[in-house]
Amino acid sequence: MKTIETRRLPDLAQALSAAGYCVVAPIEEGGVVRFREWAPGLAIAPGAVPANSSKDFLFPRSEVVARFALEPGGFSPAPVERSAVKTVVLCARPCDAAALTALDAVFNWDYRDGAYNARRQAMTVVSLACSKADEHCFCTSVGGAPDGVAGADAILRPADGGQLLVLDELTEKGRALAQAAAGTLSEGPAALDAPAVLPRRFDSEAVGRWLAANFESPFWKEAALACLGCGACAYACPVCHCFDLQDETDHAECRRLRNWDSCGFGLFTLHASGHNPRPDQSARWRQRVMHKFSIYPQKFKTLACTGCGRCSRLCQAGMAIAATCERIEALGR
Amino acid sequence: MKALREAAEKLLREKRVSLVIGYEDRKGRPAFFAAKPEDCGRLAYDASCRQNLAAYLGKPEIRARLPVAVVAPPAVLRSIVVLTAESQLPPGQVLALAVDGDSFLGTFDAAGVAELLRAKYSTLAPEPALLERVQGLLQKSPAERAAFWEAEFSKCTRCYACRAACPGCYCSRCIVEKNAPQWISTAALGHGNYTWSVMRAFHQSGRCTLCGACEAACPQGLPLMLLNAVLDREALEEFGSRPGYDPEAKPLIGSWSADDDHSYMR
């Protein structure tokens, strides 16, 4: 088995960095663990589910998608730099890696998104299997597993009581990465730790069936009462991918920006006429649940939720999508 | 806890309110909406309650169910007074179930809330730990402070959880969403992020009750209370403004007086 001591993760990051990878890893700062670019001297915090998801490095929160140079009497299109840096996400959670299937589907559906696909091509995902889960985790209810390999190019599995990590390459990209990091890996035996035990909380297919028949249920009014309509859940979600296009202009040029957007915002569906087809928060929360558990599986044969629990972990108002699904399943019985 | 639950139950049973907005007796103490007397057993209050429930008073679905009662520690009581002073609460439609620490202080209408605050909380000051953090920051040079905020604001994703958590942010169309003209860049990047957080803090000056809900709601852990505490001090020192005590007070940033200091105009 290819192994590395857990405490030597920064050496692995260093080796990959030296091999030309931009290394993204969970790093603690000010009490919050985030996926961010690793630099020498930074500790890696493999235990936590980072506050952000690894989607940030495929679909950044803001990017320029077009530029126009302003000239007297008109404008002309200007080039947009489109650089996809060779990147590795180290210690992604299996629920982050699993999200790639859902993201790939939507960014290659009616339009092949150049910016997304360029980054996706250049990205290698090294998951870290979970030895523990918290009360917000529910990957086993949405087809995942604490040691699931979907979407990953390689996976690190904790062994010897967390002292060691065993690297399994899963794809060509994973094998290239293992080769680049060969100097930091050892060959030898290791006793794999048991993955986290996470009983299934709900049956996502039963939830989908109820949703397909209950768009107008009074359930939504009551279920969304606590939601205050911010975008925190959508922005932390590894699968949420809605965006807004905004043109911002100064005296010299116009930049067309693609910014993250969220169905939780009232403005999201507000028409220029003033009409809003989702006039209240219950219609918006319904959309969020419907999209993840009914619309997406119908369209793309995959759920738009990987059970990472980030949305519920950070929501101050206590909106928890797994609890909502449990209630929906009970309604359908 | 028992007294709070009984008082809430009584309000619902006597149909004085149609909804009690409180905190639920489970981990994280999320918002809980008791619509029936028998729901009130699920209410709880302790120091781990971080949300300012007055933020719900602007939500259309809640407005449709007035009259309501709100479980309110002192900072939330002050928010209710601010909203009253700014004509944001229909008179007689909001009751406060006042709580503090382990104590339930009673059920109050808007006038009663102001009276309670004056009688019992007239000397409310920012928490010492917060003032210490402010002092630490003010000891830095302007360049160091700018670098500190630049690093902090770079984490902002513009999810606007701070705005949603704040009872003072009740505009139906926020300035950050206006684009003709555009005041604040929509990109979740350096300059726009800086402008967003600073402008939001300024819009709260003389209105913020230092409840801490914005900072608690920020998924990125931005130290927003540092901004609020400094502006709170400026509002007090420069204008004698103590928001959330007088329901008749004109909001500091929405009023003007001939006696204001004009010395900066030459």
Image (spheres, coloured by chain):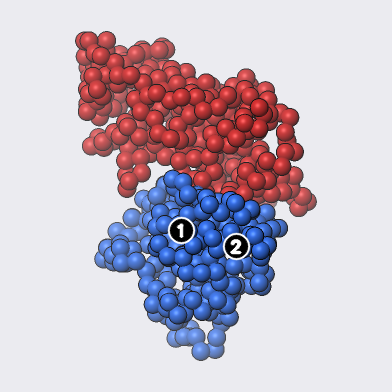
Chain colours: A red, B blue
**Which disc number belongs to residue A311?**
none
Residue A183 seen from this side? yes
Left or right: A39 in relation to A151: left
Q: Which residue is mark 2?
A: B10
* Residue named by callout 1: B1
Looking at the rendered image, the quarter that the C terminus of chain A falls into is top right
* Subunit under mark 1: B
What amino acid is labelled 2 in the image?
A: Lys
Image quadrant where one finds the N terminus of chain A: top left
- Taking depth in this image into account, of A253 and B49 the one nearest to the observer is B49
Q: Residue at coordinates 37% horizontally, 24% vertically from top-left?
A: A196
Q: Position of residue B35 (x, y in %)?
A: 64, 53
Q: Nearer the viewer, residue A105 or B60?
A: B60
For label 1, the crowd category at 10 Å Cα-Cα, with few meaning under 14, some 14 to 19 and many 20 or more, is some
The local secondary structure at tag 2 comes to helix
Q: Residue drawn at (42%, 70%), measured in percent from left and top?
A: B231
* Residues tagged 1 and 2 counted as in contact (Cβ below 8 A): no
Which badge, 1 or 2, comes first in the chain's sequence? 1
- For the residues beneath circles 1 and 2, the answer to whether they share a chain is yes
Q: Is residue B208 above or below residue A135?
A: below
Q: Quadrant of residue A2?
A: top left
Residue drawn at (45%, 31%) of the image: A137
Disc 2 chain ID? B
